[in-house]
Image (cartoon, rainbow, N blue to C red):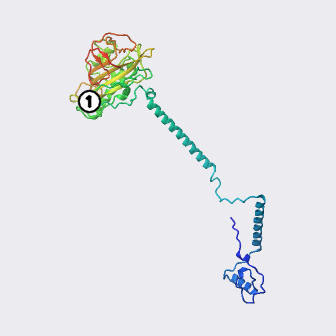
Amino acid sequence: MNWWWQSRVGEWNRTVSTRTPAGEPPEHPDEGGPVSDEQWAELLRQAESGAGDAPKEPSARARMVTARLRALDEEAAVSGRRFGRKRKPAEPWQPDGWRTGPAWQERNGRARKRRRLVGALGFVVVLGALVVVMRPSLLTDHLPGGGSVDTLPLPAETAPPTAAPADEPGVDRPTTAQPFRGSPAVRWADGAAGIEIPEARAAGGMSKDEVEQALRATRQFLVAANLDPATLRGEKPEEALDLLDPLQKGERKRLEQSLAEPGAERDPLVMFTRFDPDEVRLVGDVVKTRGRMTFEAGPAGSVEVKADYTFVYPLVRVGGDEVARTIVRRELTVALHDPEKFVATAGKLSVIRAQQNVGNTACEVDDGFLHPSFPSDGPGTSPTGPDVDPYDRREWQPDGECGTVTRT
């Protein structure tokens, strides 16, 4: 940028005075008095030698530019007065786009949209919370097994329960969309997730790894015998049978016969859960599970595992949609033996004890299948035993009793 300037020397008057005596300078030369030749010569001498504060005479170009600027200023002043306008003061210089540039506008627009979106989402959340508080069923009815306000999963069972599970609030009949509605099992784990194994440790002369192998094999057997879809459809439970020790005297053969020719004396339901596929089918693919597993040292060179689990099965008739539930509780004790001390197969389980309680099945039928009754069914065979809560895991019901379940 070019900066124009004016020299002070241009303000001086070089007219020779005839009133001032020669050799005497005027008292106030800057008030318009004449300057003598001697004074002017002295000023020039000081300017040439750099002394004093004497201004220099502007060049012809400087005087021309100065005159031109004065003419322009006078012309602008006359024009403004002529049209009655005031000159707008010049604004300080700023970079292009500093206030309304595209980048600023874009950022501001995005921020405004975000504020609007956050506000809208906040309103929806608050409204939804108010609706759920006023009518919690709008939410709970759409949860798996719905119908209960408290649907949080229960913690794993680590000790025998001291009371039966409480009734679920708002008990309604189950539906195909909510097959566990009104059941305590709505808060139980799904299928194999409910079969947790305890932390292994050495016991009975068996190492920690061998004890863990026994625990895992027991879990695998429970899943294959009570949760595998093929087993539940009445098919032969091959995987479960393969986990049992073929050297255990008579056990494998007895189970094979009970599956092939079921009867009162050879009942496969003592070990396996089976339904007649021509009669009923499962609703969905979830079976609710709850229980616990423990272990202890057996005879030297063996470890015994005890499993106590309850399974809840939602069912409908083939071609129907009315839901019923059958509840099966199993207590199974198996052992893993050291082949060097027992006649046993390494890694295979030997059955020590097995028993079951079943809620909602026909007592008088021994065909190797469970037969649930449905709410619309008429009265069946009169029960001879006491009323039983199939969800109460505190005690085992006596063998051979046929009572009435208080809930399913």
Q: Quadrant of the N terminus?
A: bottom right
Percent coordinates x, y for residue 273 in the rendering? 35, 19
Q: How many discs appear? A: 1
Above or below for 31 versus 263 = below
Q: Position of residue 148 (x, y in %)?
A: 40, 27
Which quarter of the figure has residue 378?
top left
Crowd around label 1: few <14 · some 14–19 · many ≥20 (10 Å): many
**Quarter of the image containing the C terminus?**
top left
Position above or below: 286 against 56:
above
- Pick out the residue farthest to the left: 300
* 136 lies above or below 67: above
Decide if residue 183 is in sight here.
yes
Q: Which residue is mark 1?
A: 295
Inspect the image, locate mark 1, and give the three-letter code of the amino acid beneath it.
Phe
- Of residues 92 and 373, which is closer to you in this image? 92
Element at badge 1? strand
Q: State left or right for residue 1 relative to residue 287.
A: right
- Between residues 181 and 210, which one lies in front from this camera angle? 181
| Viewer-closest of 20 and 311 | 20
Q: Position of residue 6 (x, y in %)?
A: 71, 72
Quarter where residue 38 is shown:
bottom right
In this orientation, which residue lies closer to the viewer: 144 or 234?
144
In the image, 12: left or right of 146? right
Residue 345 in picture, x, y percent from top left: 28, 25
Q: Is residue 239 visible?
A: no
Residue at 75 percent of width and 79 percent of height: 13
